[in-house]
Amino acid sequence: MAATDRGRPLIPRVDVLGVGISAIDMDTALDEIERWITAREQHYVCVTGVHGVMESQHDPELRRIHNASGLTTPDGMPMVWAGHRAGATAMRRVYGPDLMLALCDRAAARGWTSFFYGGREGVPEALAARLTARFPGLRVVGTYAPPFRPLSVGEDAALVERIEAAAPDLIWIGLSTPKQERWMAAHVGRVQAPVLLGVGAAFDIHAGTLAQAPRWMQRHGLEWAYRLVREPRRLWRRYAWMIPRFTVAILRRPPRLMAGGSAETTGPAGTRAG
């Protein structure tokens, strides 16, 4: 029998180098998030591909954050392939920009409210304008573009107060990994919104400031190559070490379905961290 939480089946996860990736598809993700909003449960969603998994290999706290999430979605095709290899054959890609569109569509229909936090100056406002035009009825109750530095204690307290006054159902975070994951882990429970979602580049993509890889490249796991061609100076170091190391590591430690339907906090060699 599947493990349960308060009488409901737990969503299984696949251990990918110690990070528990939720074995889901888009409909499952949307239905689970809707359940949180209806029940007023507080959770955060990590949207994770190879980058997040590899960062977690030398950052136990980031790995713990991924594994304590309500969902850690398979953002890239390598996560989906890892899930299929582990036996989660129904697992499908839940890509951050696609999740944003699908959830905004549902939010417009349900009357849920959104707050957009992240991006450069002007980006969250442009994002809100484009999404409300695309989804009539979408309710945006606030936007904030943070400075390119950590917020002071006072600034963070003021931000929390601002978010609480807006009372959103969904808080969208558009920071880079691992900044957005750390922000969600630090603020879940401090803000009363039931859902925090770290969607990174989805802010720039849907605000119209960043081009998206063609679908055929996405389907074949080549989105990294498209991004590298467009931003070689910023990304070449990341991809030069990340992809070869991920490939070697996944061959040495094959993905597996995790017992109990939830992730364990494990180290890169499979030993329990902490």
Image (cartoon, rainbow, N blue to C red):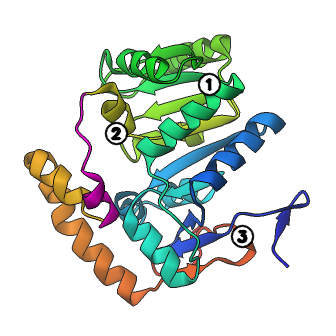
Decide: few, some or many residues near mark 1? Use Cα within 10 Å; few <14, some 14-19, many ≥20.
some
Is 13 covered by the magenta stretch?
A: no
Q: In the image, residue 87 lies at what x, y percent?
A: 58, 83
Q: Nearer the viewer, residue 8 or 68?
A: 8
Check disc 2 and give the amino acid type.
Ala
What is the distance, in whole Å, between disc 2 and disc 1 at their CAs? 22 Å
Q: Are marks 3 and 1 in contact (CB under 8 Å)?
A: no
Is 211 covered by the magenta stretch?
A: yes
> Which residue is labeled 1 in the image?
108
Q: Nearer the viewer, mark 3 or mark 1?
A: 1
> Which residue is labeled 2 in the image?
201
Decide if residue 17 is in sight here: no
Q: In the image, residue 29 lies at what x, y percent?
A: 62, 51
What is the distance, in whole Å, between disc 3 and disc 1 at their CAs? 31 Å
Check disc 1 and give the amino acid type.
Ala
Question: Along the horizontal axis of the image, is 213 left or right of 4?
Answer: left
